[in-house]
Image: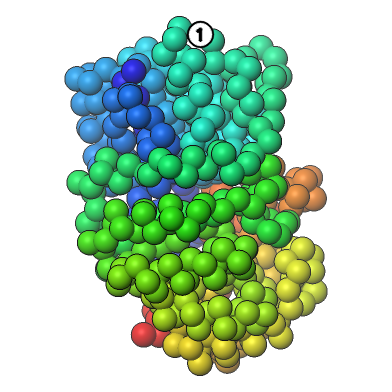
Amino acid sequence: MKILLVNPPNCGRSIPEERYGIDTIKMIFRGEPLALEVIAGNLEGHEVRICDLKAEPEESLDRCLVQWKPDVVGLTAMTCEANTLLALARDIKERSGAMIVAGGSHVSCDPDFFNNESIDYLVVGIGKLSFRLLIDALALGAPGQGIDGVVKTDPSGPLPLIPRAFSSADLVDAAAPRYDLVEKNRDRYVMSGVGGKMGFVVSAYGCTHRCSFCAVPNMTGGRYLSHSVEAVIRDMRLLASLPLIRLVDANTFGNIRLAEELAEALAASGLEQRIVADVRADTVVSHPDLFRRWKAAGLATVVIGFEEVSDRRLEEYHKRSRVETHVAALAILKDLGIRVIGDFIVSPDYGDEDFEALVDFVKSNPIDLPLPAVLTPIPGTPLYKQVRDRITIHDLDYYTFTNAVLPTRMAERRFYETYAGILKDFTGHIRH
């Protein structure tokens, strides 16, 4: 079969820009479509192409539909891209008649949103194996029903979804991502604040924790699943020409034993790539020796979700960490010479004192690139269930993590002006 996998264009709308003319708050995603490369890697025996509309003009999609004529088109979307996915599905269905399959982060969080006549099937959760099983069924002319984690849409009724019990088998370790399918766009995949061309590698899916705002557990049914050390090294070798590797796991060090084995294998591999990885602050504090080993193996930068500078708010988010732990982790990483990108959450109920506390924390600690995002309750998360009655903006185009979809405590204009000011200050003085 001919299978076209489509990454939607950069989209999403901005309240501060539309209402107040503040055009300095942008959320642009320029990373390669690794989820689609991973899916493509397990489709041996089929013709597969990837159309990355974040990096290519939309005419490239037109050419594929008209000239190549795919049998199946797979679409993916984050929350702010959900409406765009539906529009793409409708357009592709009308023009080509191809079978439309949707998957990705927001499909896994809120599959009912995509129970639409323009979409034929949904793949809920990580889909490397389940999408392949669906394609195998369709290739034989069989209905793609009865596959756990795959559901046939039916706009006339509720989705008959059978949840998938995810396991290590779903990672299909033996099948490498199809990095070659986006090679023409490689120069466009860069990481702000780190610099240089980079490639994406995944070593683990899911997370060991359950923060209330996080949608990651929806991808694995709450499990934490690790690729083998051999698979991670293989994928890095496939990108050996690139100076920078971004491990895109939500928590690269969720399995300490495997993290130790991977550090040892990296040190012996001969690879000389700089590595960026996500880590929890409490892991750094509990295992400083592990990070010494990773530093020697190439770890140059870590991304830490500090989220808050208040223990009370950390408890509300079920972060299971404390501010003093964050400070201790920063001291360890500074001593090791590992750069830190710090993610923070700006709640719509922030007042002047909260913004000031965030600025004071950042100025008092060695954070090389602080990135504050606006608290956004993603459908399917515990936070969404907790606050859904207070949500004032339901249009998912605004769920970019730069808009307040809950009421602001400060006057709205002042909230956005303050947020825009600290964002400019934080990103304009990147430590090198």
What count of labels does the image hold? 1
Q: In the picture, which quadrant includes the N terminus? A: top left
- Left or right of residue 301, residue 187 in this image: left
Q: Residue at 40% x, 69% y: name it.
A: 266
Q: Can you tell which quarter of the image residue 21 is in? A: bottom left
Q: Residues within 10 Å of mark 1 (few under 14, many from 20)?
A: few
Q: Residue at 47% x, 76% y: name it.
A: 294
- Left or right of residue 293, residue 395 in this image: right
Q: Position of residue 160 (x, y in %)?
A: 69, 19
Residue 429, visible in the rendered structure: no
Q: Residue at 45% x, 7% y: name it.
A: 141
Q: Position of residue 145 (x, y in %)?
A: 59, 15
Q: Residue at 23% x, 33% y: name it.
A: 60
Q: Is residue 297 above or below residue 9?
A: below
Q: Which residue is mark 1?
A: 142
Q: In the picture, which quadrant includes the C terminus? A: bottom left
Along the viewing direction, whichever of 190 and 166 lies nearer the viewer = 166
- Left or right of residue 70, residue 376 in this image: right
Q: Position of residue 420 (x, y in %)?
A: 49, 70
Q: Mark 1 is on which residue type?
A: Ala
Residue lying at the far top of the rendered structure? 141
Along the viewing direction, whichever of 309 and 129 lies nearer the viewer = 129
Query: Mark 1: which secondary structure?
Result: loop
Chosen colour scheme: rainbow
Residue 75, visible in the rendered structure: yes
Along the viewing direction, whichever of 22 and 225 lies nearer the viewer = 225
Q: Can you tell which quarter of the image residue 159 is in? A: top right
Q: Can you tell which quarter of the image residue 191 is in? A: bottom left
Q: Position of residue 291 (x, y in %)?
A: 53, 79
